Structure formats: C-alpha cells, structure tokens
C-alpha cells in the first residue's frame, strides 16, 4: 500500500469511528469528499477496495461479536459514499461513450462514402451500409468479410490494389487507389479507396480505417473527354490536310481548265494579230468571233463552276433548301445515285448562321456516300418536328461495323457532329454491314430559325 493510500486509510478510519458514534450526516459527507479526492488524484476502485479492506481489519474484526453487525452496516454505508464519486464518473464515461457512438453512427449513415474498418492481425472487417450499397447490396446481404470485397475486384486491378496496400502497411506510403469492383448485378463500377493504418510501438499495423466512393460517372466523363480531345486533334489535323488538298484541287482546276482555255484564247488572238491584212475582207469573220466568244463563255462557265464548288451563290441568295436541291441534282448526275427528297421547304426559315452548317452537313454526307458506300439510292429528309429540325440522310450502301477501326470517312462524320453541336443539336449514326448508313441530326428550331421580329 502506498504512502498516500495509507494516509487516506487513516482518514477513512477516523470517518468510520465518527459515524459509528454519532451516525452524523457530516461523516458521510466527509466520506464522499474523501472518495472525490482519491478520484482526482488518480486512484481507482481497486485502491478504494484495499482501503476498505484495511478499515474492516482495523475496526470490525477486533470488535466484540455483538457489535460487529452494527459496525458492518455502518461500514457499508460509508463505503457507498466513498465510491459515489467513482460511480458518477463511470456514468459520465458511459454517457460520453454513448454520445460518441451515436455521433459515429450518424456520420456513417450520413456519409456519401462507404466506410470500412479492418484489423490486419485478425482479418476482421467492418463495412458500413453505404459501402455495401455502392456494391449493390442491402446491409444484410453482404457479410463483413474482407474476401467478400477482395473477390469482387476486377482481375486486372487486383495486383495494383495489393501493391498499394502492401506499400502502405510496410513503408507507410499513402493508400489512395482507384479500381473496379463487380456489383451484385454483375456490372463493374469504378471506386476510389483511401485508408490510413495505425501501427503499434513495435511497428506492426493493428488497425486500418478508410472509405470508398463511387467514381464511375467521373471516370466515364474523363474517358469521354479523352476521346473528345483525341477526336479534336485528329479532326484538326484532317482539316489541315483537307485545306491543302483543296488548295491543290483549285490549283489543278485553274491550271488544267482556266489555264488551257486562256492559252487557247491567247493563241486565237495571236493568229488574228499575225494574219496578213486584206483590205477587202472584214476585220473579223463571224466564225472567228464565234470561236473567241465560245472560249470566253467556257472561261465564264469554269469560273462559275469553281466558285459554286467552293460555295454556291444561291446559298446566300435563295437559302439552303434551293442550294441543297441543286447539290442533290448535281450529285445524282455525277455519280448516278438516285436521291429521294422529303423537304419541308415552306415550314422552316433558316437563319444566316445555320444555312452553311446544314448545307455542309448534307454535302459531307453525300460525299461520304459517293466515296465509301457503293449505294444506288439515298433518302434525304429535312422536316420540321417540333421543337426540332430533323435532318436525315439514309443510303442503301454496304454500311460498316460500328466497333471497327475508324476509317478516313469518320473525319467527315466528326465534322458533321461538330456542326450539329455548334447548333445545339446532336448527330446519331446507325449502321451495320450490308445495312447502309443512317445519319440523323436533331437540331433545335430555336437555333436554326430566324427569330421572329418584335411586334
């Protein structure tokens, strides 16, 4: 028994003697204060039991047998007062523990993350209800067993998760890993898992707590963004290539067509210049004039044709529908492909911004048909379907497998999709081997039509 406990024992015996003699409440109050002091000094219930046992040995056992029951009752009353501060403190600890557990349960139930708690020594594991919900299970459908989660990890991700966990437990690296898990329905979803272990003084991990979050939507968005950026890079490179090809085509047109015609016109003028003068003959014969006029007409036709290929004049003068009609006629005549048209020409008033976009989409679609489809018939629809304008081009060509590698014509489809997006719409592509291509652009009328003038 320590010196301090011996001092308290002496004080306790004095309290008992006073209470035996007077049964005064003041003695009980002093016993309570004695217990409170012992608690504040760090003594425990076992110390109070030793103190009480010493008092029994000093007062009760030496007393005459006739007085022992009275002494025992008085001793029990004083001992209850001595322990009262410890009991009150114990109730406080229990209340604090209950409040802490309640806060933990509220945090678990209100968290958007799935919590887990793992004992590396025993392999015991706890999964919160939301953890199980992320995997598609109700709370009672998934046991709190680590293998229940480990076995659900995608086979391609198991090694990466294991390496990250080992690095955390052995070298205390950060545990933050993304992987796929198989849900109750059989689909795989992406999750992010983070955790923190606790180590004993000897360096052995004895507990690890963490959480998981469903990041499938984020992964899907990241993949879509990656694909979009890749497509934009490819489209940008393709646009540069098309510009160079267009420049080369125009140069050939100018050299082979206009150049030859201008050379022929120059030769005709040179022959006239060096002809021997005949005072009796007219300056120019009708045949000579007709030949020169014919060369000039050919030049004019060539200039108009080249300009129309670049941008039809009627697109600005008459709007996209007449320009598309002209384009379809030219396409049919050049490639011997029938174009069946269903166009609501009178119900849609295209604004200036949408004219060129709609025309180029049709032009690109027909170009793809001519280059790649082997079709003999094309159905072209431009219809009003509130609140949208529907542009649809369907051919009866050879089609393609959607999962196949992108071909050169996919750049044209990318361009069409970009034009549809510029107008706030979207492009749907349907195809299969032997089933042709069906391209449907859904464009909001609010973006393609002229705004009504204010009244």
Image (cartoon, grey):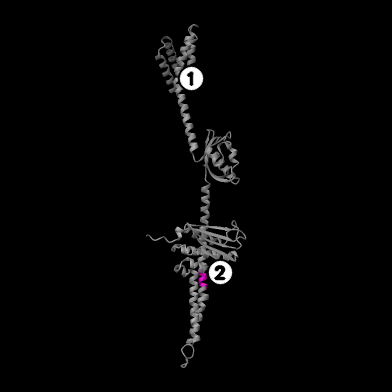
Q: Which numbered disc covers residue 47?
A: 1
Q: Which numbered disc covers residue 270?
A: none
Look at the picture and state if 332 lies above or below 144: below
Secondary structure under tag 2 reads helix
Q: Position of residue 178 (x, y in %)?
A: 54, 45
Q: Is residue 251 magenta?
A: yes
Q: Main secondary structure of the magenta part?
A: helix
- 418 or 315, which is in the foreground? 315
The structure residue drawn at horizontal position 58% and vertical position 37%, both measured from the top left corner, is: 141
Q: Position of residue 156 (x, y in %)?
A: 60, 46
Q: Quadrant of residue 39?
A: top left
Residue at far bottom of view: 280
Q: Position of residue 451 (x, y in %)?
A: 41, 60
- 351 or 93, which is in the foreground? 351
Look at the picture and state if 289 lies above or below 177: below
Q: Quadrant of the C terminus?
A: bottom left
The residue where tag 2 is placed is: 332
Q: Which residues are magenta?
A: 247-252
Q: Position of residue 323 (x, y in %)?
A: 49, 68
Considering only order in the chain, which callout, 1 or 2, is on the residue closer to the N terminus?
Answer: 1
């Amino acid at each position: 028994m320590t010196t301090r406990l011996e001092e308290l024992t002496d004080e306790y015996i004095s309290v008992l003697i006073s209470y035996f003699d007077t049964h005064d409440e003041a003695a009980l109050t002093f016993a309570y204060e004695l217990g409170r002091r012992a608690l504040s000094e760090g003594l425990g219930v076992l110390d109070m039991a030793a103190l009480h046992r010493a008092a029994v040995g000093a007062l009760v056992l030496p007393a005459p047998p006739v007085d022992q029951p009275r002494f025992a009752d008085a001793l029990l009353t004083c001992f209850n007062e001595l322990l009262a501060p410890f009991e009150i403190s114990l109730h406080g600890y229990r209340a604090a523990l209950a409040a802490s557990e309640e806060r933990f349960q509220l945090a678990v139930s209100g968290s958007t993350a799935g919590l887990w708690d793992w004992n590396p020594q025993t392999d015991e594991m706890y999964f919160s209800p939301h953890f199980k919900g992320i995997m598609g299970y109700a709370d009672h459908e998934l046991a709190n067993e680590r293998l229940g989660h480990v076995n659900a990890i995608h086979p391609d991700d198991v090694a990466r998760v294991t390496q990250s966990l080992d690095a955390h437990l052995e070298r205390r690296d950060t545990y933050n890993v993304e992987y796929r898990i198989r849900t109750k329905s059989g689909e795989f979803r992406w999750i992010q898992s983070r955790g923190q272990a606790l180590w004993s003084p000897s360096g052995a991990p004895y507990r690890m707590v963490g959480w998981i979050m469903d990041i499938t939507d984020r992964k899907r968005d990241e993949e879509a963004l990656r694909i979009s950026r890749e497509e934009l890079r490819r489209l940008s490179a393709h646009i540069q290539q098309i510009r160079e090809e267009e420049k080369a085509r125009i140069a050939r047109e100018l050299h082979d067509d206009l150049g030859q015609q201008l050379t022929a016109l120059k030769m005709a003028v040179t022959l006239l210049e060096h002809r021997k003068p005949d005072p009796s003959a007219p300056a120019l014969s009708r045949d000579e004039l007709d030949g020169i006029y014919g060369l000039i007409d050919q030049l004019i036709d060539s200039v108009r044709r080249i300009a129309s290929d670049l941008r039809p004049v009627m697109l600005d003068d008459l709007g996209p529908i007449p320009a598309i009609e002209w384009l379809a006629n030219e396409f049919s005549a050049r490639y011997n492909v029938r174009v069946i048209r269903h166009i609501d020409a009178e119900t849609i008033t295209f604004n200036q911004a949408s004219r060129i976009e709609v025309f180029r989409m049709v032009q690109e679609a027909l170009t793809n048909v001519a280059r790649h489809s082997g079709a003999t018939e094309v159905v072209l629809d431009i219809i009003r379907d509130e609140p949208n304008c529907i542009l649809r081009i369907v051919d009866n060509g050879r089609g393609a497998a959607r999962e196949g590698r992108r071909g050169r014509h996919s750049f044209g489809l990318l361009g069409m999709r970009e034009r549809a997006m510029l107008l706030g719409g979207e492009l749907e592509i349907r195809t299969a081997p032997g089933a042709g291509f069906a391209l449907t652009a859904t464009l909001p009328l609010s973006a393609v039509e002229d705004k009504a003038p204010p009244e």
